[in-house]
Image (tube, helix red, strand yellow):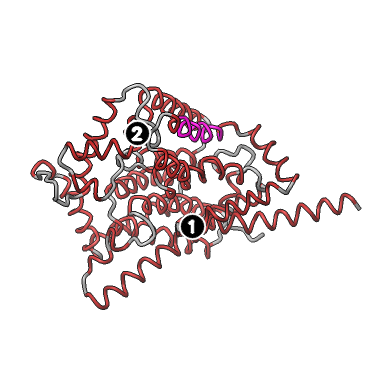
Amino acid sequence: MGYIKDIYCNSKRHDYDSVLIALISFFLPFRKEISFVLCLFGLILLIFSKVRRNVLIENLVKNQSVLLLSILFTLYLVGLTYSTNISFGFKDIDTKLPLLLLPLLLLSINQLSLTKAVKFFIYGCISTSFICLINSFIIYLSSHNSTVFFYDDLSIFMHTSYFSMYILMALIFSYFFFQNSLKNKNYKAVFLYAFFIFVFLLMIFLLSSKAGVAIALFLIFILVIHDIFFIKKMVFTTMMITQALLFTLAIPSVTKYVFNRFESANEVSKVKITPTSKTNSTTSRLVIYKSTFQVFQDNKFFGVGTGDIKDELFKKYKLNNFQYGIDQKYNSHNQYLQFLATFGIFGIVIILISLIFLFIKKSFSLNFIFFLFLLIFLINISVESMLETRAGVEFFTFFYTILNIKNINYDSFFSTSHR
């Protein structure tokens, strides 16, 4: 009877875990703190469940790479101790809470449930994509202005750079579902994920984040190489060639808008920053990077601390005649520079050694999915301070944790068979 009861309890816990992780994954691209609230609910369940606590301890021992997240969170706490603006410091710590809390939840959940996370994340991304497109179409009916389908006007859930990063991750997962469906001759799923890939690529170009588009092109190149030399069916490659022709010939406005976004970056040297001017993203970044490096030069060894980084940046913006940056409360728009100014040489060395070690380790372990995830993230944080917003912190923490768990069979992520 005890054995039957254990099976029943484990089955019930698996059901709860599946629902919880499905909801968290689905709502990740929606933002509005929905996923974080669900995470807190899951942690409350963890407190009152001995079984969950035992699973957590077991997985922490097996998956010590996840401890990097707690090291990063601890670094922010240490940075708070020598800050003067404690109020902002605590707000920043609140933003970073998923670094500490989300891994505790994910490592306490039944590992079979985690395999559903990827599929529901894709569903969340396709849902937000359609909501954005429908919203733009409704606005277009009254304005007749086609620019509502591009860039900031399209992205209603988060900044375009962040949304592009989410969509890129969904694109990678869709690629593996697509290939697995081909392998299993599940042609209904093949067409479904082919459609998802089309929508995600279209969204990347419509969002027109320069980093997002550049990463997407590089990513497609990698996946095409994977398709030709490892899958050896070339269905995906054929699909990419067809889609490229469609974008170029049938939807020229998409490629024209994206081209204009990149073309504007070449005009940076001709633009003069004034206190009241609203500059484009590229010209703004130049003065932001200059200001951030000036903050670092004044505080080389330990940085200015978690609480004071914003105040010190604003002082440099004022010094550099960049009032618009103060009005918009711009961060460093480069996570490496943000780390450098916040924690100084000692902090950035700890962070870079951890990231480089992880990158090398995963490259040698041939964890291709994690490699692509880390590639997307490491490139994105060179143009955005991704860990200064909850959207970036949750994205990094969620997939870093799941893709680091050793006892997950990653092939099971992409199973399209009926269970």
Nearer to us in this view, 154 or 173: 154
Q: In this view, does 75 lie to the left or right of 255?
A: right
Residue for point 38% across, 62% down? 199
Residue for point 61% across, 34% down? 63
- Quarter residue 373 falls in: top left
Q: Name which residue type carries label 2.
A: Tyr
Residue 233 drawn at (x, y percent) = 45, 50
Looking at the image, is mark 1 or mark 2 earlier in the sequence?
Answer: 1
| Rendered image: mark on residue 336 | 2
Residue bounds of the magenta highlight: 66-78
* Observer able to see residue 239: no
Point out the residue furthest to the bottom here.
142
- Quarter residue 260 falls in: bottom left
Q: Mark 1 points at which residue?
A: 122
Q: In this view, does 183 lie to the left or right of 90?
A: right
| Rendered image: mark on residue 331 | none
Residue 382 highlighted magenta (yes or no):
no
